[in-house]
Amino acid sequence: MAALIIVSFLGILGIYWIASGPSRRHKRHQTLAQGVFPASWRAILKKQVAHYPLLPDHLQQELRRKILIFLGEKQFIGCNGFQITDEVRVTIAAQACLLLLNRDSDFYPGLRQILVYPNAFYVNRSERDAAGVVWERHALLSGESWSQGQVLLSWHDIIEDCQHPFDGFNVIIHEFAHQLDQEDGHADGAPPLPSSERYQSWSSIMQREYDLLCRKADAGLPSLFDYYGATAPAEFFAVVSETFFTRPGPFAAHHPELYAEFTRFYRLDPAQWR
Ligand SMILES: [Zn+2]
């Protein structure tokens, strides 16, 4: 009888623990956001993150809050002898948090670790061809997002992006857009949206623009979006997210409906920041 009571008690405790998860997480985030943002970190933001001085004051403040939470929650691991410093942590956190700036988000809930390599790195890939034969190959990457809780990044490529912040490419934004896309368990170019109407609008505009990019890539025609976005809908979302933050003016001018869809998703209008 006593054992039965203990088992029932533990069961209730377990259910309570799971049910109270979101509020415990919210409290932890609030506590982390109240921490001190060191002056040396502000200096890193000014030096490395070109978006930071363009943001209105309230968004600069919000970005600093989100960086504190991000750095309080995520683990950074240096690979191939790479040394993790505050410059590395703040530079990556700031650009990862640009994507969350105005969204009521859970801070990449599936993500636990950021693995940073000094340069582009090799990963093993198995790919099945049209005949069903599986090929093993070595792929050289500047970044990759895994659904098991890791993002992999090359510091060399991050520094290149910091030096050319508005050229349409940003490996951090690309990989963390994949994390947002993967939040519902599928990397399919459709991140979680608040209503079925939003999904309808999202999928019709995304499909139309994805098909357009595929046709341009096939014909070798000029495109604002990198051809890599034509390899899969998930890559299209990541590539368009890069363009949204790094070439927002031309994006808004040439693809207004898609741009409007992204402003609704990210709750930001980067074309107004300059
Ligand atoms: Zn990608």
Image (spheres, rainbow, N blue to C red):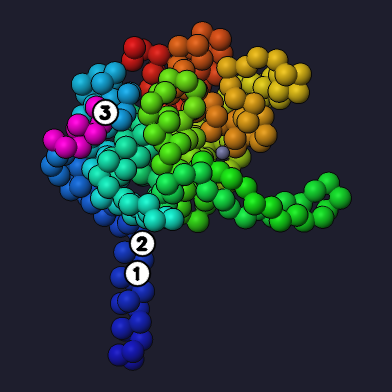
**Boundaries of the magenta span:** 39-46
Q: Nearer the viewer, mark 1 or mark 3?
A: 3
Q: Which residue is mark 1?
A: 14
Label 1 CA crowd tier, 10 Å (few <14, some 14–19, many 20+)? few
Q: Which mark is drawn over residue 18?
A: 2
- Reading the image, the residue beneath label 3 is 47
> How dense is the environment of label 3, judged by Cα within 10 Å: few (below 14), some, or many (20 and up)?
some
In the displayed structure, does residue 164 sit left or right of residue 57? Answer: right
**Residue sitting at 80 percent across and 48 percent down?**
129
- Mark 1 or mark 3: whose residue is earlier in sequence: 1
Q: Amino acid at mark 2?
A: Ile
Determine the residue positioned at 42% across, 46% down. 118
Three-letter amino acid code of the residue under disc 3: Lys
Front one among 210 and 220: 220
- Whether residue 94 can be seen here: yes
Q: Secondary structure at mark 2?
A: helix
Q: CA distance from mark 1 to mark 2?
A: 6 Å
Instruction: Relative to 98, say whether 141 is above or below.
Output: below
The residue under the point 46% across, 52% down is 150
Where's residue 56, x and y in %? Answer: 25, 19
* Figure check: 220 above or below 95: above
